[in-house]
Image (tube, rainbow, N blue to C red):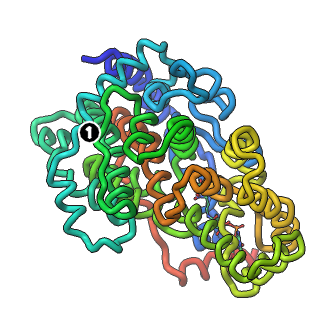
Amino acid sequence: MSRLKEKLLAKITEHRPRITRLTKEFGKVVIDEVTIDQCIGGARDIKALVTDISYLDPQEGIRFRGKNIPETFAALPKLPGAEYPTVESFWYFMLTGDVPTAEEAEEVRLDFKSRAKVPGYVFETLRAMPKDSHPMVMLSTAVLVMQRESKFNKQYHGMKKPDYWDPMYEDACDLLAKLPEIAAFIYRYKYKNGDIIASHPELDMGANFAHMMGIAKPYDDVARMYFILHSDHESGNVSAHATHLVASALSDAYYSFSAGLNGLAGPLHGLANQEVLDWIKKFKEKLGGEEPSKENVKKAIEDTLASGQVVPGYGHAVLRKTDPRYTAQMEFCLKHMPNDPLFKLVNMIYQVAPDVLGQVAKIKNPWPNVDAQSGVIQWYYGLTEYDFYTVLFGVGRAIGVLANITWDRALGYALERPKSVTTAMLEEWAAASTSK
Ligand code: NMX
Ligand code: MLT
């Protein structure tokens, strides 16, 4: 057993009695109530999911295992000359809550290396798809077609519930180790005439991804930063929730993560990073050579609102401040590409949009989210095919959701099955509330 798996087992064994005690002794303690608004409005804010892997505070933003973004970047081991930690060290941290030593992170790299070979039929499947399929369809299909590799699925009938986490962990590691090569294949196949660059197994995940994409340094660090920043945003977001929901039926990691990716591909979720670049492109086309200014940015935002569309990259279901993932990427830009015209334009939008959106009463959060800033960095390093951006989000999101479904199995979380009511029932409750 690898040292990571041993540590994980120890953590699971330590954690289980906490869940048993909570359910057995305090199961009926009330922690929330549900309003009609929440029932109709996407279950917003209802406390009904448990995860110890990340927590999202509306004001402060995300904490991974109790650490905010700067603390996470500072704490985890980095390779010589690198600005950002390895994805491997972050995976160890997300699974166990402990910061690995450089040696422990290296063990994860070696473990991933032994799992990274992508079955040939995955590439055949992707080559058989229409070339104009969206890259997210390709990624999700590639993940789903690998379901036949699932160790959980193969072992299910001979296993007891407390052991379910073991093959789930194996599937999670197998899948995560393969994703960078699949993503890079999709990119090079679609946009670089199929000129595929073979994996370099001695590199860490971020550097190997940069290598397979054919993008020079510091894109290795961009990849590390990007995958870590996009990894997890507690459990209620669409991709994490969809993955968890499907896994709760004891579907394996391949089925579950493919479902999560399908949710991530929606324009209100991960696809917003593509939409941001599209919005900017159309905005510049309309300017027809005129320089962007605060005035014409304001007008473009107002036009978007008037047309009934959302302004991509702004707003959030939970956050009520600028997303710290936006800020982390902005800091990267200020250091590496301060004079980039696209970065300057994104900054100008940041100066204008919150005021304009803040005047629309129904919008609860006028501040930028992660997607407002992420495409600019990719564009700067030559990745201008912006319909690929959500694939990058998807590779990063795998880290969080796969760690979560491994823990779901470890703690024996139940089949998810909330109760629905009818409109007539809501009307009855509404009438009863006025007659009091
Ligand atoms: N532009 C225009 N209208 C907006 C925006 C925006 N950026 N944000 C919220 N609204 C509208 C929203 O559509 C809703 O209108 P209606 O009642 O007519 O349906 C109203 O304001 C209330 O929405 P909120 O309660 O503020 O936000 P909600 O929790 O429903 O939605 C988002 C959150 C993220 C879906 C929403 O802010 C949005 O659509 N933003 C733009 C798309 C985006 O950037 N998504 C990426 C989120 C991060 N991620 O990667 O997933
Ligand atoms: C995410 O990273 O999942 C998004 O910010 C959406 C969310 O948290 O609801």
- Using residue 422 as the reference point, say whether residue 64 is left or right of it: right
Query: At 25% across and 57% down in the image, what residue appears?
Result: 144
Which residue is the extreme one toward the bottom?
307
Asked whether, in this view, residue 408 is left or right of residue 297, the answer is: left
Q: Dot 1: what SS?
A: helix
In which quadrant of the rendered view does residue 362 lie? Answer: bottom right
Q: Is residue 399 above or below residue 360?
A: above
> Can residue 91 be spotted in the picture?
yes
Q: Quadrant of ligand 1?
A: bottom right
Residue 28 appears in view: no
Front residue of this view, candidates 55 and 276: 276
Residue 339, percent from left and from top: 77, 50
- Quadrant where the image shows the N terminus: top left
User: Where is 166 relative to 38, above or below?
Assistant: above
Q: Is residue 203 above or below residue 430?
A: above
Q: Quadrant of the C terminus?
A: bottom right
Instruction: Please give the count of numbered marks on the rendered protein.
Output: 1
Q: Is residue 165 left or right of residue 60?
A: left
What residue is shown at x 33% (from left), y 15% (from top)?
3
For the point 53% across and 18% down, the residue is 80
Give left or right: position of 260 versus 218: left
- Per the image, the residue denoted by label 1 is 171
What amino acid is found at the position of numbered circle 1 in the picture? Asp
Q: Position of residue 68 (x, y in %)?
A: 67, 33
Quarter residue 138 falls in: bottom left
- How far across and down, in percent of the image, does residue 89 sit? 47, 25
The residue that appears at 67% across and 62% down in the rendered structure is 313
Residue 12 higher or lower than 102, as above or below: below
Depth check, front residue: 16 or 178: 178
Percent x, y for residue 171? 26, 39
